[in-house]
Image (cartoon, helix red, strand yellow):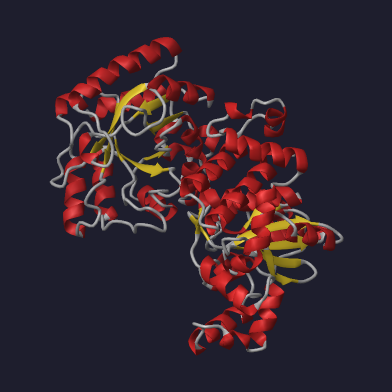
Amino acid sequence: MDNRPIADRLDSFATLLELAEANPYTVRAYRRAAETIRAAALPVADLVKTGRVRQLRGIGPGIEARLRELVETGEIAELAELERDLAPELIGLGRYLGLTAKRSIELARALGVRTAEEFRAAAAAGRLQTVPGVGPKLEARLLEALASAGAQAPRPRQGLLLNRARELVGGVAAALDGEVAGDVRRWRDSCEHLAVVCAADEPEPLVARFANLPQIVGMIEQDERRAVGVTVDGLPIELTVAVPGRFGTELVRATGAPAYVTGLEPLPDAPDEPAVYARLKVPWCPPELREQPFDGEPPELVELGHIRGDLHCHTTWSDGRASVEEMGRAALERGYEYPAICDHTPAVGAVKGLTPDDVRRQAEEIAAANHALKPFRILRGIECDILPDGRLDLPDDVLAELDWVQASVHGGQRMPRREMTARVEAALLNPHVSCLSHPKGRYINRRPENALDLERVFELARQQGVAVEVNGLPDRLDLSGEHVREALAAGVELVCSTDAHSPRGLANMNFSVATARRGWATPATVLNTRPLEAILARRGNRA
């Protein structure tokens, strides 16, 4: 059994434990274990068989026992029992229709049904009216939602964070030997259209495999070459099975936003995407740019391989989970020339921040790590809070000692536009600031963007030689692709960084780079595509 299906089963177990109102710590432990297994370099099944699986972080005796059961028998008995008791197919359908998991279970038990097909039949027969608490309005809403459940490219009620969407849809695509499509392939920050495209002369076996995947608990639409399955969280995933000679055609159609695809129609039949574009006599277009139609040839976009260093990393000096040397070694293993250690300052409030004395004591640890890793270079940096009046949270003499200074707003994200803009502008005038971190302060699906006037800030950043960050944390992705394009139009340089709080967090660089690509960023516009000497020289010129 490969790592991905093992991780998928643990994810399913965690979800059903949560629905069964198990201890939240247990639920989180299984989800973390699934993440660890999905990212593991070695076959976890082999580690289980040789008794070494607890060497993986977060795998204790309880999870080890479940893994051994799964590897040896192919299933987890308690998971199968939960699936029988909770009817996850109906929970998934209910969540897709806008019901809570609890309400879905209540409806299923009241109606005496266990499958989506039985639920549809009961609703069509008017039996929803017999369920306590279901009035005419709720019945009408559910019937309308059921009637539209087979619509083209169904959407969840809230977009899925990009990292979760890539894990989910990537797992489905890998299991079916297909390709990820939809919003995930375009690296949208919040994914609604979750899609996979496969090629086969005979579609029935693939559709059957899709329906039986652990991620899919029920089917809400199915015909010969198209099916829509739903997860236990109510997320619809669309499968298209193209004839091999039309695989490229269907992949283009399933990847692009509707406006982009409409601009290309009618699409010619082609076995792959390059052939589609060749037959249309238009240049190849990277998936990240397939939002709106445009004329001309796209530029050479920045790629992950262009990045030479990560300029925003945290350690145990603030809220990170690894030491300076551990973060340095992890960056070195990724082939970087440099990372910048940028821990928080005290005004961040929610976590420990570095005082001036702390900054100078941390310098000793950075020096020791550099000695151990030489000629590799770890940069002395800081993520310095911008106070409400625009002052920075550390004195200038301390900032002047550093190689890299990130300026960030954390508290007070609801400030009015004028005050927020003045606050950030004051910080950009400080000659020691290298880069403005996560400028719009958003948390996707949780906190909206702040009111910062980016047009004014970008103009001042250009004048002062301050870069702006494309933060790679999946729940931030700030700047967004749209704002990246505005920054580039204003002549501002970008920094692609991860805001990593652990060695594993360095992997978020792919999200930062993809977001920059969505804004048409090229290697020349991203500062950390340049060698260490250029970074240090720029710092000297700025100060």
Identify the residue at the far right of this view: 202
Q: Nearer the viewer, residue 282 or 381?
A: 381
The residue shown at (84%, 59%) is 205
Tell me how many marks there are: 0
Which quadrant holds the N terminus? top right
Q: Position of residue 198 (x, y in %)?
A: 75, 56
Identify the residue at the far left of this view: 389
Q: Position of residue 204 (x, y in %)?
A: 83, 63
Q: Nearer the viewer, residue 177 or 322?
A: 322
The answer to whether residue 195 is visible is yes
Which quadrant holds the C terminus? top left
Classify 369 as above or below 514: above
The residue shown at (51%, 57%) is 21
Classify 485 as above or below 142: above
Res. 146 image quadrant: bottom right
Res. 94 image quadrant: bottom right
Q: Position of residue 23 (x, y in %)?
A: 48, 49
The answer to whether residue 237 is visible is no
Horizontal placement of 39 versus 348: left or right?
A: right
The residue shown at (82%, 61%) is 243
